[in-house]
Image (tube, rainbow, N blue to C red):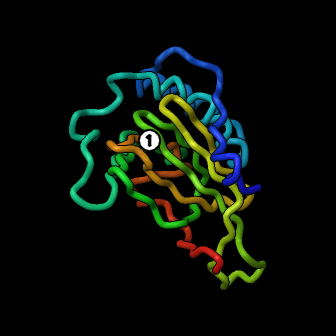
């Protein structure tokens, strides 16, 4: 459902959790994810993310700086068992990511600033067709978290509409140091 006429949707707010250190978050997520299938992982990670987003000492000064070009990407934790990774991203003012989907599951939240997310579905059932159709626009503000489905279409694009850099924190399935940007495919908008 496209929400342009009424404005973008705001992301769901999970219950406010006490601030968690990175070590506490990773320990908790590691224990929670140990016995669940991948399809349940993103929603569970998103429920715990607000606690991590409330941690003022999560990132170093260098990890908060916008890059000269593109967006900044910092792996702040990779599970030794390769179950999940925590990645901080710095989005410069006005930056928009390509429309993409992920190779593994994903949950994310906003640490500072605001992100506009656009979600898409494939334009056809043809696996060789890389066109997508926009379905939703969501606004994610500092402290909010959400997730993409692990067992359905997870095509989206991220945009920083603000006048200063935005920082988001992503939890991905697998080891981000090995996966890199975790992009499965880049999509284009159906004309």
Residue 39, percent from left and from top = 72, 48
Q: Residue at x 57, y 17 (%)?
A: 17
* Quadrant of the rendering where the C terminus is positioned: bottom right
Given the current orientation, which residue lies at the most extreme top position? 18
The residue pinned by badge 1 equals 168
Residue 79 visible, this angle: no
Residue 118 visible, this angle: yes
Residue 180, percent from left and from top = 41, 60
Residue 162, percent from left and from top = 40, 44
Given the current orientation, which residue lies at the most extreme front position? 5
Relative height, residue 24 to residue 187 (above, below): above
Q: Residue at x 65, y 77 (%)?
A: 190
Q: In the displayed structure, does residue 145 sit left or right of residue 97?
A: right
* Quadrant of the rendering where the N terminus is positioned: bottom right
Q: Residue at x 57, y 35 (%)?
A: 145
Return the residue nearer the eye: 17 or 92: 92
């Amino acid at each position: 459902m496209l929400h342009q006429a009424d404005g973008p949707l705001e992301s769901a707010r999970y219950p406010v959790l006490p601030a968690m250190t990175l070590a506490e978050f990773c320990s908790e997520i590691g224990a929670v994810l140990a016995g669940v299938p991948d399809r349940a992982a993103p929603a569970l990670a998103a429920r715990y993310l607000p606690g991590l987003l409330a941690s003022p000492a999560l990132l170093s000064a260098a990890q908060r700086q916008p890059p000269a070009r593109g967006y900044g990407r910092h792996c702040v934790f990779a599970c030794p068992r390769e179950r999940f990774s925590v990645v901080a991203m710095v989005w410069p003012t006005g930056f928009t990511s390509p429309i993409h989907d992920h190779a593994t599951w994903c949950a994310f939240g906003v640490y500072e600033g605001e992100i506009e997310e656009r979600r898409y579905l494939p334009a056809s059932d043809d696996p060789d067709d890389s066109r997508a159709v926009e379905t939703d626009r969501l606004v994610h503000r500092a402290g909010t978290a959400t997730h993409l489905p692990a067992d359905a279409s997870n095509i989206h694009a991220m945009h920083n509409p603000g006048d200063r850099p935005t920082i988001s924190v992503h939890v991905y399935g697998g080891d981000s140091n090995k996966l890199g940007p975790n992009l499965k495919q880049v999509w284009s908008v159906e004309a």
